[in-house]
């Protein structure tokens, strides 16, 4: 399994959201936060299998969308055709993501050169002949295809994942619903309560139908309902 470090481009400038393989400098990927998996979601616990599947589907959708946009942004030309074809959505093993998160990677020996707008022939003397953006550029093609794809889909990715987590909370509440109403004292209900509690810790807000109307779940106890 490849290991990654913070991506460092020209002048060792940090590029937000990008990581580079330690064993293959041409293999770069997005960090998990760039496809909608906010750090807060790492607090999710006791995720039931059906809810985990819902979250994974949302993450896969986001990664595929980012990969699609990144392929559009790669400078089109003979030098970069293989790079364009190598961009793909992949699953990642992240301790805080519980096996849910997907990300985007590019895998050619020059993937990071194009990202940083530096031609492989660059020897320290930056000029028009050594910069990818100037050789084959033009909007929307050009450098920073990963960074730009991440930025342009950020709101969409965040919304997709928020919607999935919200759906997961509703699914958990349904699991804990009996003929008498919400009951977190049962075995299934207790597991649902653990997930809902962790979801609320992320800052999620959801209303629960009661005889008094829609009540925010945060204002309700998780026991004896």
Image (cartoon, grey):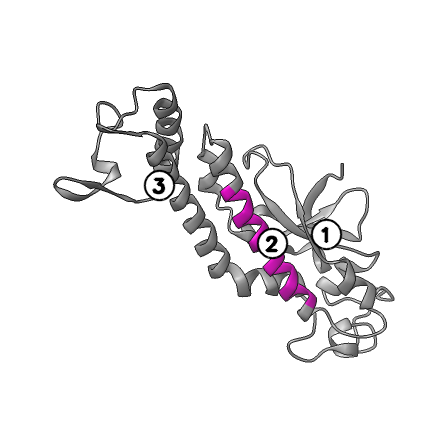
**Between marks 3 and 2, how big is the CA–CA gap?**
24 Å
Residue drawn at the location 80% of the way across and 53% of the way down? 26
Q: Residues within 10 Å of mark 2 (few under 14, many from 20)?
A: many
Q: Secondary structure at mark 3?
A: helix
Q: What is the x, y in percent for residue 194?
A: 38, 27
Residue drawn at the location 46% of the way across and 27% of the way down? 46
Please tell me whether residue 19 belongs to the stretch shown in magenta: no
Check the image and name the residue furthest to the front. Answer: 179
Quick one: quadrant of the N terminus?
Answer: top right
Contact flag, marks 2 and 1 (Cβ < 8 Å): no
Judging by the rendered image, the residue that carries numbered circle 3 is 170
- Tell me the quarter of the picture where residue 176 sits: top left
**Residue in front for this viewpoint, 197 or 17:** 197
Contact flag, marks 1 and 3 (Cβ < 8 Å): no
Q: Residues within 10 Å of mark 3 (few under 14, many from 20)?
A: some
Q: Which mark is residue 63?
A: 2
Judging by the rendered image, the residue that carries numbered circle 1 is 28
Quick one: quadrant of the C terminus?
Answer: top left
Question: For the residues carrying marks 2 and 1, which lies nearer the camera in this image?
Answer: 2
Q: Earlier in the sequence, mark 1 or mark 3?
A: 1
Region of the chain picked out in magenta, as a range: 54-71
């Amino acid at each position: 399994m490849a290991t990654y470090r913070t991506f460092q481009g020209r002048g060792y400038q940090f590029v937000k959201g990008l990581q580079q393989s330690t064993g293959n400098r041409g293999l770069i990927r997005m960090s998990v936060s760039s496809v909608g998996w906010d750090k807060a979601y790492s607090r999710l616990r006791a995720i039931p299998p059906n809810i985990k599947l819902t979250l994974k589907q949302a993450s896969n959708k986001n990664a595929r969308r980012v990969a699609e946009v990144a392929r559009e942004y790669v400078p089109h030309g003979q030098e970069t055709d293989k790079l364009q074809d190598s961009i793909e959505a992949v699953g990642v093993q992240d301790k805080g993501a519980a096996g849910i998160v997907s990300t985007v990677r590019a895998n050619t020996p020059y993937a990071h050169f194009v990202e940083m707008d530096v031609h492989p022939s660059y020897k320290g003397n930056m000029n028009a002949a050594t910069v990818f953006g100037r050789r084959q550029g033009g909007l929307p093609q050009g450098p920073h295809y990963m960074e730009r794809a991440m930025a342009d889909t950020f709101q969409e990715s965040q919304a997709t994942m928020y919607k999935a987590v919200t759906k997961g909370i509703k699914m958990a509440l349904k699991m804990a619903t009996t003929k008498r109403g919400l009951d977190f004292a049962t075995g299934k209900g207790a597991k649902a309560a653990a997930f809902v509690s962790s979801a609320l810790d992320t800052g999620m807000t959801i209303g629960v139908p009661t005889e008094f109307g829609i009540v925010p779940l945060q204002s309700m106890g998780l026991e004896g309902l």
